[in-house]
Image (cartoon, rainbow, N blue to C red):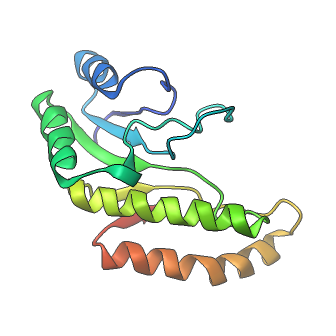
Amino acid sequence: MRLGLLTAPFPETPLTDVVDWTATNGFESIEIACWPRTAGATRRYAGTSHIDVANLSGGQASEIVDEIGAKGLVISGLGYYPNPLHPDREHRAEVIAHLKKVITAAEAMDVPLVNTFMGADGSKDQDANWEEALRVWPDIVAFADDHGRKLTI
């Protein structure tokens, strides 16, 4: 087991600075927050985008991995904790599309895990949310599997 840090609580701090602090303070791994690059209000710890996965090139992916590795850290996962079961279908589609971009970025960076959230619709009970999850999640899981990544919930 490694002691690590999630970058989400540091939305205004550049990734290189978070990596430096993490390595200097004895952590061994880092989970990198990968929300979409947007402007405007977000909820606490959501909206942090330390990697722009929508526009990540192979060269950028390698550069990030190499720089973090040079500091003695391992990337434990890429993190994006949205609500794939959101009741607004348009929002849900945006969330799932971005989650797939995070999965693709993890593949490009050879990061085995994408950390995310199961989601729920607050107007539904647990059984109804589970039924919806059984409809929504197989496609997401298959996408991750097709890209050789594992999802952690």
Horizontal side of 41 relative to 30 (left or right) equals: right
In the image, 86 versus 125, the foreground residue is: 86
Q: Is residue 85 above or below residue 69?
A: below
Relative image position of residue 40 (x, y in whole percent): 66, 32
Is 122 above or below relative to 74?
below
Residues 13 and 23: in front is: 13
The N terminus appears in which quarter of the rendering? top left
Residue in the image at 59% along x and 60% along y = 95
Q: Which residue sits furthest right?
A: 123
Give the residue drawn at x 30%, y 57%.
106
Relative placement, left or right, of 20 versus 145 is left
Residue 145 seen anywhere in this rendered image of the structure: yes
Q: Is residue 37 left or right of residue 44?
A: left
In the rendered view, tell whether residue 139 sits above or below residue 109: below
Percent x, y for residue 153?
52, 59
Say whether residue 73 is left or right of residue 139: left
- Residue drawn at point x = 66 percent, y = 58 percent: 83
Q: Nearer the viewer, residue 63 or 123?
A: 63
Q: How far across and down, in percent of the image, does residue 122 sit?
A: 84, 59
